[in-house]
Image (cartoon, grey):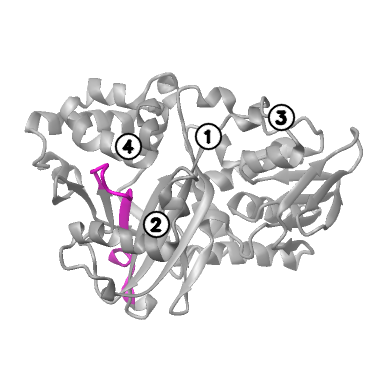
Amino acid sequence: MRIGIIGAGATGLTAAHDLVGDGHEVIILEAADEIGGLAGSLQVQGTPLERFYHHIFGTDRAMIDLIGELGLADRLRFHATTTGIYHDGSLYDFSSPQDMLRFPPIRFVDRVRFGVSSGALKLIRKGERFNDRRALEWTRRWAGKRATDVIWEPLLTGKFGGRAPDISMAWLWARVHFRTFKLGYLDGGFEQVYAALVDSVQRRGGKVETGKRLAELSQPDTGSPVIVRTEDGACYEFDKVLVTVPQPAFAKATGASSADGLWNTEYLGATCFVLECDRSVIPYYWLNINDPSFPFLAVVEHTNMIDPGQYGGRHLVYVGNYVPRDDWRFTTDPAELLERYTPWLRRLNPEFDLSWVLDWHFSAAGYAQPIVTPDYRRSIPSHRTAMPGVVLATMSQVYPQDRGQSYAVAMARRVLAEHFR
């Protein structure tokens, strides 16, 4: 078959890699000028680095297996990293169960309840029991009010803003259940995975075309070709099409009405700075900001996991956020936004100064974080669409997860098995 794939992220590239292996003619159409989707990379002193912080867990078997399949297993290393919490003006270690049991802002009995309830989430194998529960209601009952007020509620509010009380417990279960203390990262960056997938596709006759933003998608009749038009005026005909872009982009391209279920999923945008600093900014790899007054959610110092020597000795610091697309943190000019963030970074490290920043990069994605409420799963669309030749495989369909390289890879392979073979 002649197959079109919309989107060159983890889902689209994995699917293309497998489909050309099956002997199909494949063309990938990607809106951006680079591949990788939310795992796209920039260059720091000649080394690729993800625009948005990325790592994998030991439970991410689909991604680990793909890395091995592409001959990159010797570059994958799992690191014992450090985590901290900023609360009430102070930094606290939060890397291990022992740190959690010593966490001063809550009483010992509350620490125990937090630890036991978190351990229970690791042991519960099926998160379906939490589908109709709200996360903060569950944590107040089982982790306790104080642990919820200090730990869980600020984290959920930082991530989801005013929608925090509506977030499903199934989502929180998934975030706790599948996480491991050691984090995996590919020496030289995950860009190597996506470059290897592109190489695999092109070596076997497939094509990857960037700068091809989806404008219109139609299939006039059952059995007729699927017509894809891109914003630059190009037109393609395919026997089948796999769409991997966010639901709103698919809904717009197909002319779906506002009443169509494709518009039901709510998304937050993502913004992320990468600061190239001449010294370390925080003493952790990952610092959760448990203070909703802060204008950002987390600070991640990548070079507290990976040697700065790989980046010319520069210390790389992510400052990340999830916000509505009309929020000032999404719409403000990046240079001004960095200036506005600086006093808040100084709260984390009183010595911090913008002179430490030798260079910086800013990235934004409009549809990065679905808002996973108890009703969310009822609005998840089927992979099969109203057009027989069009299959939808997007991050909103990996519930109760919300995104992740490994889930994208696994979904690609599941969808191919069900709809293309």
Secondary structure beneath label 3: loop
Magenta run includes residue 43? no
- Marks 3 and 4, the one that precedes in the sequence: 4
- The residue lying at 39 percent from left, 26 percent from top is 166
Query: Marks 3 and 4, how far apart in space?
Result: 31 Å
The tag on residue 157 is 4
Which residues are the magenta region? 289-308
Number of other residues with Cα within 10 Å of mark 2, as a class: few under 14, some 14 to 19, many 20 or more: many
Q: Position of residue 372 (x, y in %)?
A: 46, 31
Q: What type is the residue that disc 3 sits on?
A: Ser
Query: Marks 2 and 1, how far apart in space?
Result: 30 Å
Q: Position of residue 145 (x, y in %)?
A: 18, 25
Visible in this render: residue 269?
yes
The tag on residue 184 is 2
Query: Does residue 275 sit above or below 23 in this rendering?
Result: below
Number of other residues with Cα within 10 Å of mark 4, as a class: few under 14, some 14 to 19, many 20 or more: some
The tag on residue 132 is none
Q: Position of residue 330 (x, y in %)?
A: 45, 51
- The residue lying at 51 percent from left, 65 percent from top is 41
The tag on residue 257 is 3
Query: Does residue 126 sit above or below 199 in this rendering?
Result: above
- Marks 2 and 4, the one that precedes in the sequence: 4
- Marks 2 and 1, the one that precedes in the sequence: 2
- Residue wearing tag 1: 266
Q: Which of 181 and 262 lies nearest the eye of the viewer?
A: 262
Horizontal side, residue 114 vs residue 276: left or right: left
